[in-house]
Amino acid sequence: MTTESQNTMFLLLNQHGPFATLEESPLHFSRFSQTSREMTNKLGNREMVTQYRILRNQVLDFLEVSSFSDIKNLLKDHNNREKMEKRSYKLLGNMFGIKGNEREIVTTLNNYSRTADGVIRYLRNKVLAPYSSHIEMTNEIDATSSPAELLLIIFDDRYHQKARFEAKRKLVLMNLAGSIDQRERETKIESKFYLFLDFLNEYVWSKTAKIGELEIVYLLSNHEPEQFTCLDYKIISRSDAEKTHPAKGQKLTLLKRRRFGTNGHEIPIYVSIRKKAPEAKVLKLLRKGEENPAVAVDDELGLMGVLETVQDVNTFQQHLTRSAIKASSFMALEDISDSLASSGHRKGKNIGSSSKTAMLKFFARLGGMRVEFIVHTYESYLNYIYQRDVSHDEYEVKRIFDSGVAELLFPQEIYHLDMKKIRNKQIDRFRWQIEEG
């Protein structure tokens, strides 16, 4: 995502654009004030003027008023708030195609509020954990779920600039959460997820073990000091792992393995099956600068598999396609990217990703589903966790900062944080946790 994105949702949050949240509420601007002139200059071109006009009309229609000056009266009209709130829930429920009675619609829209708050809490608890107190939400915004109330707060000068920005940010994130939920209902992703699990249990995994039965082993690996790449590893049992104290440059990594059978042999595989959480999908839309989840989120269903060798990886891929045939579905493999044999020289398509990351990645289309598969060898998996410039923790930091999402959600003028400096500090922090922690 870049702050130059022309999508309305992201223009709203851009503190350098015409929709910036200023120290005073928009209702306090006079037509000929310096602030109004500066905002007019920022509108710049016809497209931006059209964006502003459409957005202004949407706000007035939503609040059922004819001008911004009428919003001042609405802020004082407490008797009309309940009526306005009921109407707003009905309007949004219809927009997102939510079925059910009034209570069910309110519950669903309140879930969008929880997702919006969850995005901020996720960043506070992980990527920006040392700065948690700096970016903590204003209590009143955290406690408010009503879209109409949040919209009124943006215009209410009793609220501080930070609170009014956070109300606007929460509305933007709620809108993205609603778009995602609508798409999930349209594509029936929940039922497809369970169909995918059934396919794996019925046709892919070995029948010699019960569903969910896992073999626990550990990888004791040695890593070179410069890039912390894996030099070698050995597989040890849980009992041996309990007696092992890794030295400097060593890591002990848990694997919970299933098995699949082919040609009379059973091959162990560590599997992590993923259905992206709504918060993760919202962040992906922000990183991509895209309002439409059908365009930006193509990996709702995913599986990561870890096998010992490249030969095992190839065997697993072949086993998958043959298992699909047994399930009466052809499996087409799309967007294939294989950097296992080349020790990780791949074209990084995503912001923050490293060309040194080794993996087999493809999308499998079967049974009306499109599932993302990422497959590692033990060596590439260890590098995916620990190697400098490759590790997933570093990637998570880079993609939030390098995409502009951190600055968009926590602009420096309001939170007084220099995101460029914080980016490097956070990478150093995660590196220390990986290598020394």
Image (tube, grey):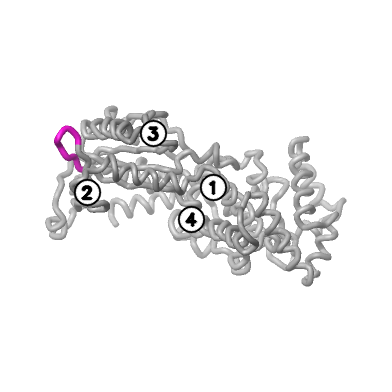
Q: Which stretch did the figure color magenta?
A: 262-268
Residue 353 location (% of width, % of height): 42, 38
Amino acid type of the residue that numbered disc 1 sits on in the rendered structure = Arg
- Is 188 located above or below residue 135 in the figure? above
Residue 122 visible from this viewpoint: yes
Q: Main secondary structure of the magenta part?
A: strand
Q: Which residue is mark 4?
A: 123
The answer to which of marks 3 and 2 sits earlier in the sequence is: 2
The answer to which of marks 2 and 1 sits earlier in the sequence is: 1
Residue at 22%, 52% in the rendered image: 210
User: Disc 1 or disc 4, which is closer to the eye?
Assistant: 1
Residue 426 location (% of width, % of height): 43, 52
Q: Which element carries disc 2, helix, strand or loop?
A: loop
Amino acid type of the residue that numbered disc 4 sits on in the rendered structure = Leu
Q: Which residue is mark 1?
A: 185
Examine the structure image and report whether residue 177 is included in the region drawn in magenta: no
Are the two marked residues, 4 and 3, in contact with CB atoms closer than 8 angstroms? no
Q: Which residue is mark 2?
A: 249
Mark drawn on residue 349: none
- Disc 3 packing (10 Å; few <14; some 14–19; many ≥20): many
- Disc 2 packing (10 Å; few <14; some 14–19; many ≥20): some
The answer to which of marks 1 and 3 sits earlier in the sequence is: 1
218 on left or right of 184: left
Q: Which element carries disc 3, helix, strand or loop?
A: strand
CA gap, disc 1 to disc 4? 27 Å
Foreground pick, 297 / 241: 297
The answer to which of marks 4 and 3 sits earlier in the sequence is: 4
User: Disc 4 or disc 2, which is closer to the eye?
Assistant: 4
Amino acid type of the residue that numbered disc 2 sits on in the rendered structure = Gly
